[in-house]
Image (cartoon, rainbow, N blue to C red):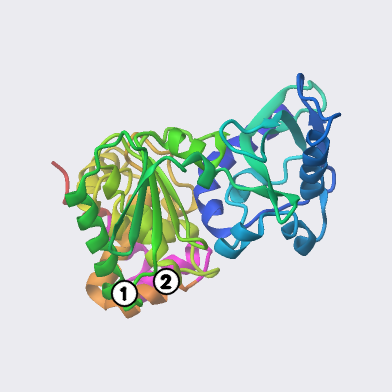
Amino acid sequence: MMGIVRRLIALLIALVTLWAREVSAQLPVPSLRLAVGFGVDTTGSPAREVFDLWRRYLVESSDSVRAGLWSQAERATWQPFDLVAPYVYQGFSDYTVVHLAPAVGLSDTYLITTLVSAVEESTKVVRPLALYRVYATVEAGRWVLANALPRMTRGWRRENIGAIRFVFPSTHAFDTRLARATAAFVDSLAIAFGQPAPLPISYYFTTDLEETFRALGLEFFPLGADTIGGRSNRFVRHVYVGASTNGEGYLHELAHIILAPEVSGRTSPLLAEGLMTWTGGSAGLSYSQLLPGLARYLAAHPALSLETVMENPPPRIGSLDVGYVGLAVLCDLVHRRRGLAGLRAVMQAGRNPAEALDAAARQLGLSRSSLNTLWRATILSHQR
């Protein structure tokens, strides 16, 4: 049992970026167990009403009823409205409210902090997935749930440049030049792919991804080795970035927003990440800056093929994600020879790696083995 849970946690770390962009809440969990932590008093009013509201939200089977428990103002602004749902509602059954009390500095508002975990039946060892916060506030004379993000960032600065609203801590020295370049990238990417002029995008950033996630409401969430990174929510057009330098210029997540129409349920998830890395870079580096690191890795692993990368991508090492950059090279190869139409044909070929690679080979007029040879040679030409 312990090994199964550990593999599950590792899988969540590896896939959460994709889940956060593509799925909504998986509540309710039929076997959900909701406990109250030490020092949490739910006997008095209004704490009792707030706790009952939270419990109803977690166990309610009807999506429409559950939506009615959330702030109408936020439902009118964001769909899906629960911004942390893709991260924390993954089928885990053990929930513990560790804090429930009036929110400091906010009238008629309660803070609810909940631990989501898996508890091994045999050993009773707790494997935490997330510690996260939501709020309860009074709206139209009744208690409703609400997101942490607008409350945690209410004192942050906001700068509107082009289609992007940059939201960041007031202590940060805003780089207007870099922000303008980022807004120009968004416009140019939309034009390059024949997409309409971008609708507004909210770009939240701090110097550290953990700090940005805390603003979102995630006090703890497994991020792996991500120190410079980001996440995006294409449904509400949000970007969440943590970068110690060039925080205004993290383009990968913006590419996910702009190019969302280019991917679908028929797109291999890793290939989608390759598209975003080709256009917007990764880990704060541009596509061209990532290529030498990939070339060194490939030179040290002569048996590595495009197929094995798609089926079982190597773990990320520092700023190098072999899967992301390797598939970015494939996108580049197809686009150079077959243009946007050829790239789209590969993107829509199917989620299975074999389907995507067969489509790429057809577009390039090559066999699968020749495609792999071309892919390796292209990467290795960037050795320094």
Please indicate whether residue 356 sits to the left or right of residue 47 in the image. Answer: left
Q: Main secondary structure of the magenta part?
A: helix
Residue 355, image x and y in percent?
A: 49, 68
Estimate the x, y position of residue 291 in percent, counting from the top left. Answer: 23, 48
Locate the C terminus by quadrant.
top left
Count the marks.
2
Amino acid type of the residue tagged 1 in the rendering: Phe
Q: Residue at x 70, y 33 (%)?
A: 117
In-image side of 367 versus 312 (left or right): left
Tell me where the magenta segment starts and ends, as one range. 350-375
Mark 1 element type: loop
Q: Is residue 63 above or below residue 168?
A: below
Q: Residues within 10 Å of mark 1 (few under 14, many from 20)?
A: few
Q: Nearer the viewer, residue 215 or 376?
A: 215
Q: Disc 2 marks which residue?
A: 262
Image point (40%, 77%), residue name: 345
In depth, the one of 91 and 41 nearer the eye is 41
Secondary structure category for the residue under label 2: helix
> Of label 1 and label 2, which has the lower sequence position?
1
Query: Looking at the rendering, which quadrant does residue 378 occupy?
Result: bottom left
CB contact under 8 Å: marks 1 and 2: yes
Q: Which residue is mark 1?
A: 193
Is residue 356 magenta-colored? yes
